[in-house]
Structure formats: C-alpha cells, structure tokens
Amino acid sequence: MMLSKYARSDLIDAARTAAKHAYAPYSDYQVGAALLFDDGAIITGTNVENASYGLALCAETVAIAQALGEGRRGGLIAVAVTGPADKGDGEPITPCGRCRQVLNELAQLGGTDPVVLCVGTSEVREVTLSALLPHAFGPAHLD
Ligand code: THU
C-alpha cells in the first residue's frame, strides 16, 4: 500500500515523540517506533533497558507487544523507527534482527508486508519488511 507523505511524516513524528519517553539510561540511545494500521491507528513503543543490560527491549518489540496486547492480529501497513539525532553517522536506523522477526509475527498474521521507514539525519530509507527479513519463519509455518 502506498503511504501519503502526510501519513509518512505523521508516523515519523509519532516515533520521535515516543522516543522522548525511552528508558535508555545505560546506552543513552533513545529509540522510538510507531506502527501504522489499516484503520489509521498508530501504536508506539520505545526501548526499555534494564540494570541487567542484556534484558533490554527494543522499541519495535515494545510497540508490537502493545499492539498484540490490544488485540490486534493484523492490519500492519507501516512502521517508523527513529534513533537519537546526535549519535552515529546519521545513517538511517534499521530494526535489529530480533525486531524484524517480532514485526514479522503481526505482519504475517494479517498477510501484510509493511513498509519500514528507517529514519536518518538527512534520509528516510523505505524498505519492506520482507526485504529486511526474506524467507521469514512465521505463524503460517505452524498451521
Ligand atoms: N534498539 C532498539 O530499540 N531498536 C533497534 O532496532 C536497535 C536497538 C535499542 C536497544 C538498546 O536499548 C539501544 O537501542 C542500544 O542498542
């Protein structure tokens, strides 16, 4: 599905706003994720770290958990991911491998291939989830 430029910038704004509440005291790397559904709803998440460092949850995973916990089982059409503006080389942030798999769960449940807006300093890279995670294992394999 094509996203209008308004939908795109609303979704990126939602991810940036969410990132303000990131709990990232250990990495100081605040991530925001925003999920857009086919009914227009946006569900966001931030990374949530832990004093036991390895237990950190990524923003995308937190957003997906929220969506599933609200009863959503499909309809995921786009995802925006933002990182802190003052870190790294300005390259677009892409979901980590685990998050790609977690995003795929809801995508495959609803039979969609969401576009992922990977936000950088001067570029938003748009890539489909299936390009980020080809030949994904998902719920359909268990039917
Ligand atoms: N992080 C995310 O929230 N999403 C990603 O896709 C990449 C990494 C978080 C995890 C950790 O809290 C911080 O960024 C630094 O790795």
Image: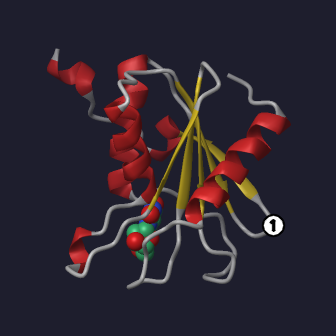
Here the colouring is secondary structure
Q: Which residue is mark 1?
A: 122
Q: Position of residue 108 (x, y in %)?
A: 38, 25
Residues 134 and 69: in front is 69
What residue is drawn where x is 66% and y is 70%? 91
**Quadrant of the image containing the C terminus:** top left
Residues 25 and 128: in front is 25
Question: Where, by quadrant of the figure, is residue 127 drawn?
Answer: top right
Q: Position of residue 20 (x, y in %)?
A: 59, 67
What residue is drawn where x is 48% and y is 36%? 130
Q: Position of residue 63 (x, y in %)?
A: 44, 46
Quadrant of picture, ligand 1: bottom left
Question: Where, by quadrant of the figure, is residue 6 drawn?
Answer: top right
Left or right relative to 132: residue 7: right
Left or right relative to 89: residue 19: left
Q: Report the residue that reaches farthest toward the top.
A: 143
- On the question of residue 119 being in view, the answer is yes
Q: Report the residue that reaches farthest toward the left.
A: 142
Q: Amino acid at mark 1?
A: Ser
SS of the residue under disc 1: loop
Left or right relative to 92: residue 65: left
Q: Give above or below for 35 relative to 97.
A: above
Residues 21 and 99: in front is 21
